[in-house]
Structures are given as structure tokens and as C-alpha cells.
Image (spheres, rainbow, N blue to C red):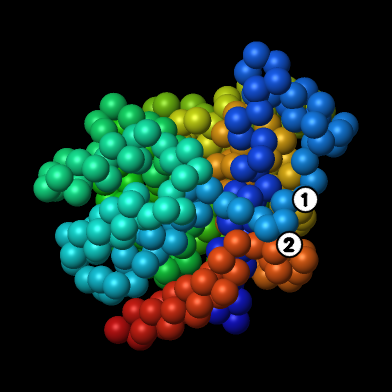
Amino acid sequence: MSEQQAQAILFGLALGDALGYPTEFKRLNPTKDVPGIKTIYGEHGIQEPPTPALFTDDTQMTMALTEGLLEAGLGAEIDTQMQAVGRHFVTWAHSPDNNRAPGITCMNGVQRFESGISWRESGIAHSKGCGSAMRVATIGYLYQHDEAKLREVADMSGIITHGHPAARAACIAGAYLVKLALDGVHPDQYLQRVLYFTDGISPEFDQAILKVGHVLAWGDQEMALRHIGEGWVGDEAIALALYCVLKFPDDYVATVRRGANTDGDSDSIACIAGGILGARLGINAIPADWRNRCEKRDDLIDLAARMAKARASYAGT
């Protein structure tokens, strides 16, 4: 069961990412927006990931972060863990697969770490981009039963690249939402629980989450999404993903389609939302044909198995 949960999270986020990737930089109207997407994909926007379903730096960095944690050990000291995560980020940064418009802040932070700057100082202090929040879903799985460690690892994994308080709150929230989904907490409680868990970190993040509650009842979903933002920054990306989850809490496909057909950072929104819904609904909620066409399918399955083994060992310590 635990291994299937890990698979559901990994495939959930990877396929959300792959669905949103083709729409992220469409610029048919002078900026990329939903009407531009519909011009290409029809009235309902993009509906299926391409074949093969290629994902972006969002999933690549999620995998790198997870590999770092597994290498260091889930119970290791935070410095040992973040040194390992940083090394895997450097490997990712130099990989030929890193050719899908990686975030500038992520690349700058990784380069600073590689140059010898401490992981505690390598992040760009003023940046609250979503590049740190998009990669934390597996932390919610690995530390589902250890909230204190979940908070620490999610927070510290973000500051390698992003230092703004709103980005830090977004990292913690992104991991915590996966934990809530795995715990079986009803989605109606997500907003309140996230605000409580991140209390005092960032007023900007709080405001973004409060917008979700404000617009949930609006009939026009596209207007509601625009009111929250575009998702290029961490607080908005989490808020937009949370909106998609709360609109379609029992439908993985509808959730990631909603995230992919947005004005802003569509791959990150759908990626974050897909990881949460994967955790909530399980592997069978994700279409089998989507999973079969997913890039690095076997690697994701292998990673899920190792995640489950590491979590079982950590829980037993």
C-alpha cells in the first residue's frame, strides 16, 4: 500500500507537470493566456498529456530532492541531508535533460551552492518564485508521521535556492498538503489546516491562501484563478493548486486539467495539484494510459519502491 501511495504521488505530479508543460509558454495573445491555449487545443483546452508525456524541471527537481534525502537517510541531521540534496541538484543542473526552461532562481541558487556557498546561504534571499514549492511533494510522504521533521526538511530544502518567507511558507505548505491527503483529512479542512501549520511565516502567503476561500463559490473558474494570481511565485502556485484540488477533490483528471489550462505557470500548478490528488485518491485515479506514456516511467516506479522502503525503516527507528 505504501509503495502504491508513493507511485500515486510521483505519477500524479509528473503527469500534471507533463499536461501543463505544453501550455506554459503559449504567447498567442501578447502573453500566454487561456484564450491562446483554446486557440490551439479547442474550447476545453488541453485534455491529454502528449506521447511521450515529457515533464519539466518541476518533476526533475522533485526526483533530485528525493534522491538526496534517500542517500543521506531520512533520520540524518539536516545539514547532511541538505548537502546531499544540493549535490543532486548540481547533478540535475548539469544533466542534458535539464533543457526545459528551468527557473532562473533555481539555477542561480544551485550554481552558488556548487561554488562553495553554504546551502543555508546559497538561495536568493529576495526570491519567492515557485521553483522551491513545486518539488516538495515527496517530503509529505516520507515524513507523513513526523510533522516536525516534515516542516524542517521542507523549509530547509527550499532555502538552497529561494530565501523569501513566502517561498518558505509555500514549501512547508506543499509538503503538508500531501501529508493531509495521505492522512485522509477531508479537503474542506485543507485551508484552515495549512494556515495554522504555516502561521507566522509570511503574511503574503496567508493572503494568497485566503483568496482561495474567497473565490471557491464563484461560478467563473477562470476569473477565480485570475483573482488568485498566475502562480509564478510560490504563494500563488500553492494557492492555485489548492483551488484546483478543492474544486475537484475526487477527480484527478479534472484537477490537473484545471491547473494546466491557466494564464500562468500551468505546469507547476498542475504538478503541485497532481501530487496532492495522487496522495488523496491513489494510483488507480490516474489513467493507466497516461502512466504508460509517462517519461521515465520505470525510474518513477523504482523511486517509489525505494521511498516506501526508506519510510518504513524510518518509522521503525
Q: Say which residue label 1 marks.
A: 48
Label 2: how many residues lie within 10 Å, few (<14), some (14-19) or many (20+)? Answer: some
Note whether residue 75 is visible.
Answer: yes
For residue 125, above or below residue 80:
above
Q: Specify whether 189 is left or right of 46.
A: left
Q: Nearer the viewer, residue 207 or 90?
A: 90
For residue 303, above or below residue 48:
below
What is the spatial separation of the Cα atoms under label 2 and label 1, in whole angstroms?
Answer: 8 Å
Question: Reading the chain from its start, which is encountered first: label 2 or label 1?
Answer: 1
Identified at 46% across, 31% down, the residue is: 233
Determine whether the residue tagged by mark 1 lies in a helix, strand or loop.
Answer: loop
- Kindly identify the amino acid type of the residue bearing the numbered disc 1: Glu
Q: Are marks 2 and 1 in contact (CB under 8 Å)?
A: yes
Q: Say which quarter of the image contains residue 41.
A: top right
Q: Say which quarter of the image contains residue 294.
A: bottom right
Identified at 54% across, 69% down, the residue is: 300
Q: Nearer the viewer, residue 27 or 177?
A: 27
Locate residue 53, reporting x and y percent: 66, 56
Q: Quadrant of the N terminus?
A: bottom right
For residue 316, above or below residue 135:
below
Q: Nearer the viewer, residue 77 or 87?
A: 87
* Outermost residue toward the top in this view: 30
Note whether residue 193 is visible.
Answer: no
Identified at 33% across, 40% down, the residue is: 107
- Kindly identify the amino acid type of the residue bearing the numbered disc 2: Trp
Q: Say which residue label 2 marks.
A: 290
Determine whether the residue tagged by mark 2 lies in a helix, strand or loop.
Answer: helix
Identified at 57% across, 34% down, the residue is: 265
Q: Say which quarter of the image contains residue 80.
A: bottom left
Locate residue 15, reporting x and y percent: 64, 56
Q: Which mark is residue 182?
A: none
